Structures are given as structure tokens and as C-alpha cells.
Image (cartoon, grey):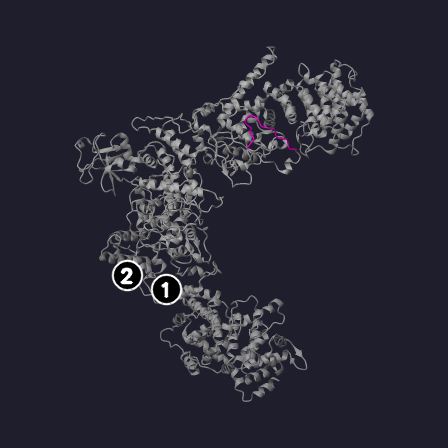
Amino acid sequence: NILLECVYEINACVPYAGLPAGGADGAWELESSAVTAVLALLPEELQPGLPPPVLSPDDIKQAVAVLHCLQRVCSSPQLAAVVLSAPSALLRIWCCLGCGSDHVAAEAARLLLRLFAPAAARHGAAPWRLLRAAVPLGSEDAATTNSREDNTLAKTAKHVAFTPQQQQQRLDLLLQPLRAQPPPSHLTSMALLEVIAALAVDPGARTSEVSLQDTCLQAAASLGRLLFSLFSHPAGRVADGVAVLMRAIAGRGAAAAAPMREAALREGALLQHLQLAIFASGDKARLSQELVASWADEYAPALALLRRILPAGLVRYLNAPRAKPSAGLSSALPAAPLVPAVATVVRPAVASDAAPQAATALGAPAAAPLVFAATPALAPQLMPGSAGAGPAAAAAANAMNGQLLASQVDSGKPYLALPNGHAASNTLTELQPSAAAGNANTASLQPALMQPQHHQQQHPIIPLPPQPTASVVVPQVSAGLRGNWPALWSAAGRDHCHAGLIWNETTRRELWDALEREEAGLRAARTRVAKGAGGWPTWNWGEFSVTYPSLSGQLCIGGVYVRLLLEGGDASAVEKLANPKEFFTACYHTLLCCQEASDATGTDSSSTSGSNSSSITAPAAGKATQQLCVKAMAASYSAHAGVIGPCEGIPHILQLLDTTMQRSLRHGLLLLVHALIAPRAAGDMTAMTKHLPTAAIATSLPKVAASDDQQTADTLSQAGVPQLPVLAVPLPPPQLPRGQATASVGSTNSNMTSSSSPQWQVPTPAETIAICAAKANGYVLMDCGGMQLLVDFIAAAHECTERRAAAAGAGAGVAAAGAGHLITSISHAEAPKEWYFYPTGSSSSTPVTTSDKASSAPDATTADIPDSYQVGEERVPGPDGSGCAGPISKEAMKQLYSKGVITRYTRVWAAGMPAPVELWSVRELRWMLSTGLGLLGPFEAALVALQVLHQLAALQPAVDETGGVLQPLPRAHRGLADPACLPHVAQIMLTGEPALVSAAASLLLLVLAHNQSAVSRLYLSGVFLFGLAYCGSNLQEMAALFKAAHLVQAFRGPAELTAGLPLVQRSYLGPLLPESLLHMLDSYGPAVFAAALAGDHNTPEVIWTAGMRQRLIQAMLQHLGDFPHRLSQHCHAVYEYTPPPPLSWPELGDEIWCHRYYLANLCDEERFRGWPVVEHIQLLQALLGEWRAELARQPLAMSEAQACKTLGITPAGDGHVDEDEMRRAYRALARRYHPDKNPSPEAQATFLRVQKAYERLQAGAAGGQGPQPWRILLLLRAQVILYRRYSGLLAPYKYAGYPQLLEVLRQQQLQEPGQQQPAADGDAKACQAATASSGVHTTGSSAATVATASAVGAAIGNFLSGDRVQQVLASIELCWLTCAASAKNAEELMRTGGLALLATLLSRCAGILPFDTAPTAAEAVITTHTLRTVAGLAAVEGARREIEGHRQLLMDIIRCCALERAPAAVDAALVAICHMAASPQLQQLLLEAGALPYLVPLLFHYDVTLAADASARLQLPFSRLSSSSINEGPEGVPGGFRVLDSALMRPNMQEARSQHALLAAQALGRLAGLLQEPYTTPVNAAASLALSSLLTTSLADKLGAPDPRPLLACLNSSMETPQVIWNAAMREELAKVIAQPVSLFWLLPNRKKFRCHVS
């Protein structure tokens, strides 16, 4: 009793999952004696060898408690091993299993499961489940595989429990409770099945011996009907266990599964699991799919049953090609031997032999290669709905689509399913509304297991490039299966709608209902048997079949479901037609037999016919049949034009197209015409027709490899709208340039041939045959008037009232405008009324033949005609005296027609028509009265017509094989350029539909490429105005048309085309667009122009904003007036050309366009610093030319008042003239006096005056004045930027702008009235006279000199104020940069008198320049650049000779050396002195001017503590220590021009002062003639003596050293050596001497005394 209480306590305290991992000491311990004691608690009757006892309830309770305790103990592998080692432990457990008690047997089985499948039993999971790792106990997810201890325990337990001698006996004992009657409880059945699964089903089978597995499966198979009866067990885990066990039995091969296959049919298991395999989801579906595959594969009765249950097209998926799985998947599986297939699973031919075979009858089963199967573990990845399923199985399933219409496997193009969501399937719900509606109410009542399969969409399929093999990799279900069962299940779970198979929600519902009814009947019969109502029933599977009512209403021609052929998911189904010519003929014959319904009676007639061996079934006749036939003809001809050949029914097709009153049929016929002229089988005819022979098919054309490029999308998609044709002009990606020009497009060649030549391709022989057939169809079409018919389709696009509306210029991108970046053209409250009619008073009147509206007399019955007609809320006026009623809109006319007021014989008239005609003879009105909904909208129909015309013109190229232009041009080109066609093609741009605009521009470019006479007058059609009024972003095609035509328009007369006018005057777009856009179009090409026009840019090369484009569009629409809106009422109206007024752009008011740049943006160093500049010489020439023109510009002769009088407008009170009023006046006068409207000479002169008046008013107040200062400033700054960046490129060329440049400086220095300009000739007397006139007296000292200069500057006046300073800054900097670029420029500047002007400028600046002035002050900047210019001049020998005559200039240069905060000016002054020292005369003049007192103090500014990096930046321009490239001046003249190009402000003044010290040392050396070659100068004894006196002889001699830094270091420190003595006291004494007046030093009678004094 104590031990039993311990057992109960263990069961109460330890969870069912078992003992926790480890004990108090890390592991649990259990003695074998304790196990034996626990086993002793079992009832004594449960002993081996004894018959099964009848246990009392207490015994059962005690036995269950003991078994529960052992289960908890066995949760630990170590303790379980102790239990196994206990004597008679397993024997007692086997006895419990056969004791006859359900409860005890169930617990014994669960104890065995603890031993055979430890991991699964611990977590309460089924032993056939694969478990994951790292999850807590009690969860169904544990470990991917059992641990090593678990595997060891399971293997040991199975070996001990099932010895070879006892295997069969123990298995019989294990299965005995299942055979008992009544059947065991659900818990017992589940436990026993799990024990069997742990022995024979993966993953438990991996620890079982092979013999044990075989014996266990044979024993399970011997259960027979009992095992199958468990399929319908109410416990789901029991049914699952039976299923996995059945799968394991079937996996042992056909021999092992053979008894089970027959039983599966008799017992109805195949019926049940087929339903689950198709309609269930998850593991249940996968298991059922594997069971059905194992029962039916290679089993003829089961396959025959499947053919009666499933559609034949679905069963064909068993033949889908499969490739061998990868080595990693199949290496563990031996290849099962192939045996001959039975039923519909056929063995295919070799792939190499299958390709050349002819296709058999449509719908025949397709052969497919059979490959080996993969492991069953991969099966879940193949089923719909699983995480890793889909693509592979769907690929094999989709590959079957290509086999449904031909008998051979298409080895050229495998198929791949695209992801969900790309296109919805065409289910039969759309085709059969009644069937779908009938089952709609039952959808919610369907079981949940079929719901997951119904929401899936059909995957559209696309052809991939040819691969080495035509098979698709599809993992297999299990080894030995011959059919592609994964493909079947995958296909059954998806929607199909192609010519060979219809499978969708409706068909699945019908299959579900049939299977459910059959299974319910079988289940009811067995329920009655269970209640004692007869013997056990079996399933009558031999007579069971399923019918699909939803598949009975399809038009079938030649064995092909026509609707599904056209609208199925397989886009290439039509290409796989076995006999396309017979199919096309049969469709056309059916079309002829179906007479069109009469509008009066509304009846339809239909018939069925056959062609050759093809059978035609027409369950639905009349209109629907006609439309299907036309669509099928279009699809088949487009794919097989070469095989079918030229069509003989084109005249009838065009007649039916014109006369039919069904919109849908008309659109279908239009698509058929598109297929006849532009079949896909012909490829891209725009790029291929050049190689076509002129008379016959060229059989000797070289055969090229098949291209893998994507072809044009199918023209018979659900919408029926094909894609745009390939452009004749290949355009690059649109990218705006950044200062780079393309050499190939830089020319301004206006020849359209070069801009419209396509990239030619040689067609294949098959394409050549198709092209010839299309070409023959094109000639027949033109003979029958088809071209005008297509143009009428184009014109009808204006009837579309639904237009896209959005803001124009929505961004700078160049994306296609299909997203809606459009604006409405004009807003009208009501439709315009364009039509008039002549009521006859009776609907049965005879046709009227009167040809003149004005002379038409009223009919005899007009007395009965009312005075007005009420149409809705609108009242239409009745006929006037001539019998003409109206005006009236189309909609009102349609309503009057429906009331009988207007008949087909009523005469109508609109503006532009020569005379009234019958309503029925006006195609526009006749088509308006058509009935029904169309396949296409007006825009789509017009697009198709444009494509047909484009391909028609491409089929008849205007050039031959050698590139010569044909004369006369081909018929298609001449016909489309005719005034009856060309205006309507151009006017289609007014619709604003992006696709139509692109297609129309491409067609015009192709047709007019070689028609010079037509293209020169293209502007009269208004196409340029229409194109500029378009507000979309897809502008590349239009830009290509503009590029080809804008320079060849005859709007200025043919004589001016070769007159060399500027681009803005030669281009028709010149008055309408800024010059920058014209430059983009002419130089960079159409793509860049399109990107610029559609974008928002503000750069030096283009300024174009969204607001500018919006104003352009508004101006164009205002110019067009109400014409775009009138087209909606009269589609065939033709635009009456009126020249547009030139447009002005306020955004460009402060800009100058020069060559290819906007100068204000180019000169904006903050926004566009470093913007690349190209064509430097041309730009400089353009700048100089613009500068000269600006200086020579005179005020306009016509005043604003005269201009207003010429235009006939009155300005406002403030003198402002409204721009819209200007344009209206200009348009009105242009309509009267333009040469194209009025050819008289007087009219031409008047028009020229009107143009000048309009230009005068556009110019405004500033436009009537002379040169503008801001324009001159921009021109100067642009030249500065050009020379600053590209002086090396401009150096070989002499600058030609010095006269204008000096004139600018001269104008800015004009003195004030009453003052005399000082002389600048350098004469001392002249300087004194100038000083005296200023009221300043010289003192002879340096201070007096400064005062004199300041007084002169004050007397002349400070000119550095207002706008003048900017021009002076730019001009003087340009002087310096040009001189630094080339010595030729310095000579040219000297020749034009620049030195005197520079001397005067420097004198004026120095006179007002304090020593501490800021370096960025205007006077400091001007001084710096002037000094730099003088330094550049001084480097030239000829300039030095002239400088000798300007003594004041020398004094100003010397004075600038004392500037404290302008380091750049000091550098320039020192370099200038260095260069001047090369002349002995200038040496003397500099010494006399007092150079030494200014230069010597600079030596003491050197900083010996300067950092190493700063010291390395110091430059020695006159030393060999520095790079020669740094020191060279213009054209190799030595002398520090790199120093002059430094910044005006220096971040480190100590570094700047050190640089001054170095330059001062070199200047002193050159003044004394101390430097060495090649920087030697004439020796000056006076300077040498003075320097020796000031610095001592030893230090003065060091001024000639190549590196003066040691000398400077000595001078700025103390040193006492036998050679050199220098200290602070000497520096102070020298500073005092330097501070004395300069004249005292130079006038000393004996300079030796001074030297002695210093010594």
C-alpha cells in the first residue's frame, strides 16, 4: 500500500511530460529492484502464458496508475534504460496490451510509444511529425531529430521488444485490439496506430531494422478493410495515422501497394482522399495527395476513374515534363526502374526527334519526358498553399498549357509562372453568369477545407529564352511514381482558362458537389449496415463519373475553345495551333455564315459549317459568334501570317468595318486589320523592311540566329489594345547635359533622313514570308480605301469626353504622362453646336440630291415641320427660310434620330463641308449612331489605327537597299502626306492622350522623312502648336519630330533658309521657345530636349520652369481658341493656320543668352561654381560679338505709342498694355496680312510692321534704350570666368576686346564737369601741373608724395560708387587675366594705350587708399588687379620701355608695398618691381622714387617660427628652388605669376608677411643686380652700395643667394660670427634711418658719411 501511494504521488506531482532534465546531483537514479517492485503492483493475472483475464475496476485503476508512473519514469532515457533492463518488464507490458481492457491497453501502448518514440511522446506529438529544436516541454515542437540518447533508447527498445523470432507474434498482439469487435475506443486506436507508425513510418522508422519495417507494414496491410474503415474515424489523429501508415505501405512499391489499391477502390478511400487532395489544405491535403498518387499511379482502373472524374485537360498534367532533381535532393534515393506506362501516361519521343514532327490534331494528349521521383519529405513543398510551394510545380503545370493544342512538346520555350497579382484569370464565372449566380448562394455553405483553394488567381505565363532542355524542374512525390502528380495537384488548385482546359471556382464547386454526394451516399449505406441493415456495402466505382454543366456553352471551332484560345492565361496558345491556315479559314467561313442582325428587327441568324476535317460547333450564334470569329482570325493571323499567307477577304472586311452598326464588331474588325498589316510573326517591320526584295521573297537571305529580345505584347489581350509601335528613331535615355556636348549631335544638320533612320535588322526567312504577306495585304487595303477609313478612326478620338486632368509641369522627371500629368485644354459649360440639318417632314422620304446648302428649297411637306425641337432641356431652332435647322450638337442629333425626326436620308451640313449630304453618307455620324458597347474606347481605337498606318508606311520604305530615296515616293507615304490625311493625324495631338501623341509624332516623322515638299509646309497643319500645347511628359517622339522639321519650315520663305541666319531665326520654334531649348534640340538631340521641356531647370545652359511651360501651354491654347473643343462635335474639321505671336519670358529678363550659356547663371559663383564650359573659343568670340553689338545698340525707332497704334490697341491709364490684348490684336492682324493668307505685297509690308510693333511692346521701356550697363557687366564677368578657368586653352589666341575693355574703363573714369583730367604721360611736369590744379603743393618728401596722390584722387572724385564700381572690377580683372594668359595680349594692351589708362586708374585708387584698407574693399581689389596687370606688362620688354615714361606709376607701385591688410596687392607690387628691375632705367627710377625705404622694412616681416607646412607654401618666383611651371609667366617669361593668382584674403597673415619678405629680398636682389642666372639683372652700383650701407656688406651680398630664407632668419634674429654681426640694436638704428625723409638720404653730398654713421 505504501508503494502504491508512492505511485499515486508520483503521478500527481510529476507532469505527464516526465521528469525534468537532471536531478539534484545532475542526473536521476533508479534501481532495477524499484522497477521490479512497481511492476509487481500490476494485477497478478497479467502474467505471460496466462489467458487474458477479466479485470475488475480496481485492478484496472491500479494497472493504469502503474503504467502512468512508468510512462513518467521512461521520459528520461537513462531511467528508461533501467526499466528495459528490469526482468520481465516488457513481458508484463505486452500482457497489459492484450488484457482485454481498453484503458489498460491504451496506456500500455502509450508506454511502448515512450520507448519507441521518446521525443514525440514526451511532447504529446504524433510520431510521424518532424519536430523543431529549442522549445519547452509540452509543446508539439521539440527537436529536428531525436537526440542521440533518444535514438539509442528507441533502437534498443525495438530490438529488445521485437526479436527476429518474436516479430510476427508481437505485431499480431499489437494489432489484436484493432481487430476486436466491437472496435476499440478512439484513444486505444490512436495509441496503437502511433506505436505502429513509430515502428514503420519516418522519422521513427529510421531506428527500426528493415525486416521489422517490412513485417510491420505487411501486418498492417493484412488488416485490409479494417484499416480502410479507420479513414472515416471521427478522431482526426486516427485518420491521420492511418493515412501516413497507408502512405508508408504504398511507398514500398507497386507490389506492396497492389492489395491496397483494389481495397482503396472498393472501400471508397480513393473517393474520400481525392476530395481531400483537391479541396483540403495543409498536411491533410498533402497526405491525401500522396495516397491518391500511390493508389492510382500505373493502376489502370484508378486512372480510368480519374479520367471520368476530372477534365481531360487536367489529367494531362500527369504527362508534364519533369527534370531530375538536384544532386542534393536525389542522391539519397536510388532510381526506380521505369516500366511501360499505362492509360494516358505515355512515354514521349526523344527530344531531338520531337521538334521536327508535325503537330497532330488539336487537343490531343501531349507527350512529356518522365523522370524519377524525389523523397516524400519534399512533397509539402509542391502543394498549393504551402510556404515553399508554387513556382516549381506551377512551372510544370503551366508547361502543360503549351501541350493542349499540339501533339508534340514545344522544346523551344519553357514557361515560368509569374507571382500572384500580375493578372487575374478569366474564369468561367465571367462567361456563364447564370451558372455562377446559381452557385453563389452555396459558397458560404461549403466546408472550410475547400475554401483555401478558391481565392487563388491564374498565373499569367510568359515565354522564356530557349534553354538546353525543355523540361521543368519539379520535385517528385515519392520514389517509383511515373506520373507528374505534383503538377496535377498544383494545377487542380489553380484557375485555368485556356483552349484545352477550363478549371475554376465553378468547376471545382461542381466537382465538390459530385464527390460529396457520392461519398454521402456511401456513408449513409454503411451507416445503415452498422445499424444492422444488411451486409457491408462496397463502392460502385466502375460507373461513377462527374459532369460539368458549366463547360457546355463554348464556341468550338476545329476542336478549339475559341473564347479560351483568345482570353486564356496562356499568351502563346495561339502560336501553338496545329493548322493555323485551316483554323483561320474556318473562322472566316463562320463569320460569313453569321449574318449581321438587322437594326429594324433586331434578329440574329447563325449557322454551323465545317472546313476540311475541322468540326464547327456554334452553340451561341449571332453577334457574339461574329465577334469571337473576328478575334480568333486576328489572333491566328498575327501569330501565323507567314503560314496563312495574304488574306483574300480584305474588301469584305473593310466593307463590314465601314457599314456595321455594332461597335464591338467594328472594333474587332479594326484589330483584325491591325493583325493583317502588322502581324507579330513579322517582327519589327520598321527595322526589317529595308531588306525586303522589291518583287519576290528573297530565299537567299542570310539566316541569323533567333533573337531573344522581347516582342511586342499580344495585340489581342482582353482590352484588345496593342502596344505602341517601335519608333523609327532610336532615342537615348533623356539626361540633361552638364556642360558637355555630344559630337555626333553637335551639328545643325536639318536633313530628316539622318534623324529618322532606324536600326536595321535582317529578318529571318519566316519573318520575311510574314512581311511579304502583310505587304500584299497593305496594297489591297489601300486599293479599297482602307487608309481613309483608318484616318476616320483617328479623327473619331476627338469624340472622347473623358480627358485626364492634372497640373502641368508636375516635376522635372521625364516619366511617361500616362499617370495623368495633363491639364484640360478649354473649359466649356456646354458642347458647341456645329451641325445643321434639313428636316424632310417624314422618315420615309427619298434621298435628296441638292448640292448647295444655300440654294436648298424647302420640301413640299415643310408645312408640317415644327418651328423648334425639344431635346431634353435644350430647344433646337427649326428650319429657316432655306429649310436649314440648327445649329445642333451631336448628342441632340442622336436623340432626334431616335425619335425619328432625323433619318438616315436627312441632309446634314457643318462648317468646312462643301455642301449638305445625307446623314448616312457621313461616316462620323453613322458611326455615332452605332449600338452596343465597343471593345475599345475612342482613344484605343485611334491608337490601333495609328499603329496600322505606321506599319503600313514601314512596309513601303521610301529608300531602297542602297539608301537612295525612291521617286515617286511609295503610295502609303504619298497618301498619308495628302491634305485629306495629314491634318487629322496632326490634330490627334489635341486630344492630350499620351499614347496618341507619341504615335502621331512617330507616324509623321516616318512619313515625312523623305518628303521635302510636305515637310517644309508642315507648320501649316499646326502640328508645332499642337505639340507645344501638349502638357504630358512623354515628349521624346514629339521632340524627334521637332528636331527633324523645325529648321526646314518655309514660314520665312525659301530664300532665307540658306542665308546663314541665327538659329532662333531659322527655327520655326524660335519665337515660341527660349534659345536655350532650341540649343538643346539642335545640339543635344531630341531626348535631352524632351527632358528639358518636361522638367524644371535653372542652370547656365537651360532656364525652363514649370511655370514657363504652363504659360506656354496657355498661350498655345489661347491661340488655338475653341478649335480643340469644336473637334469633339466635328471630328473632320481642319485647323485654319494662323501664325502665333512671339512669346516673352519674364524669367529671362535679367539674362543674356550667349552661344550656349545664360551668362547670369554662369557668373553665379555661389550656385554654379565650376560649371564646365565647352567650346571656349566660340564662346569668347560670341561674348565679344555680343559686347560690340550691345555697345552699338541704338534706341528703337518705334515708340510704344506708335506700336499700340499699329496694333490698334489702347494702353491703360498707367501706360501698361495687357499681354493677352497684345496677342489677340496680333492674331487678328496676322489672319489678315500673313503671307500665307494674303499674298499681296502690301499685306506683306503691313505684316512686317505688325511684327515690329509687337516686338516693340514686348521689349518694354528698357527695350527702347541704348546699351544696358547690366548686360555689359555680365559680358565682362563671363569673360573673366572664361580666362580664369581656361587661360591655357586661350593662350594661343590674341584677345580682341581691348578697345571695348579700355572704353569701359575710360567711361567710368570720366571726370566731373568743370574739372580737368590729369595727364598720364609720365612727365614730371605734367604730374606737378595736375597736382597744382588740385590745390595741393608738393613738399619733396614721401609724405608729400602721398598727399599729392590723395589730393589728386580727391580732386578727381571718388568714382568707386554706384553701378560703376562693378564694371571697373570686372574690367580690370579681365585685363590682368588676359595679360597673364599670353604675352601677345600684353603687347596688344600696350598697343591700344592701356598702360596710360592703368596708370591713371592706379593713381586714382592709390590716392584714396589708406594703408590699413580691407583687402575686399573695392579700391583695394581694383588696386590689386591693376598691379597684377602692370606686373604682367612688366614681364614684357616692350612694355618696360613704355613704363619708363610713367614715373607716377612707379611711385604708386612703391607706395602699395606699404599696405598692411591687402597682401595680394603687396605681392603684385613686389612682383612688378622684380620685373621692372630687368631694365637699368627702371632700376634707377625705382631707386629715385624711394623703393628702398619701402622694401627694406619688409625684410623684417619674416617669421622664423612659421610652421613647416606654411613655410613649404611660400614661393620663390625668381629662384631655381621652385618649380619652373610655377614661376613662368606668359609664354615662358619667368616671374611669379602663380604668386599673383593667390586669394585676396589670407587666413594666416604671418604667412603672408613672410611671403612679402621673400619677395622683397628678391626685389632688392634684382634692383642691385645680385641674383644669379637665369634671373640676373644689370648691376646697379648705387643700389649695392646703399644695401651694403643699410645691411652691412656681408648680409647685403646674401641677397643674391637662391634661397633668401637664411638671410631673413639672420635679419630677424641676433648673430655674431667672424663674418656677420647683427643684433637688435642694429635693427633699431636701421629703422630710424629708414624713417627719415627719403630726400635726405638721396641728396646727401657724401653717401659714405651715411654708411659710416650706420657702421
Q: Tell which of 1239 and 443 is nearer to you.
A: 1239
Q: Tell which of 185 and 520 is nearer to you.
A: 520
Extreme-front residue of the structure? 700
Type of residue at label 2? Ser
Could you tell which of marks 2 and 1 lies nearer the N-terminus? 2
Determine crowd level at label 1: few under 14, some 14-19, many 20+ residues with C-alpha closer than 10 A. few
Type of residue at label 1? Gln
Residue on which the image places disc 2: 1199
Residue 867, x across and y down, in percent: 20, 33
Determine crowd level at label 2: few under 14, some 14-19, many 20+ residues with C-alpha closer than 10 A. some
Mark 2 element type = loop
Q: Tell which of 211 and 521 is nearer to you.
A: 211
> Does residue 345 belong to the magenta stretch?
yes
**Above or below — where is 1363 with respect to 1535?**
above
Residue 1501, x across and y down, in percent: 58, 73
Q: Which picture quadrant has residue 886? A: top left
> Does residue 864 belong to the magenta stretch?
no
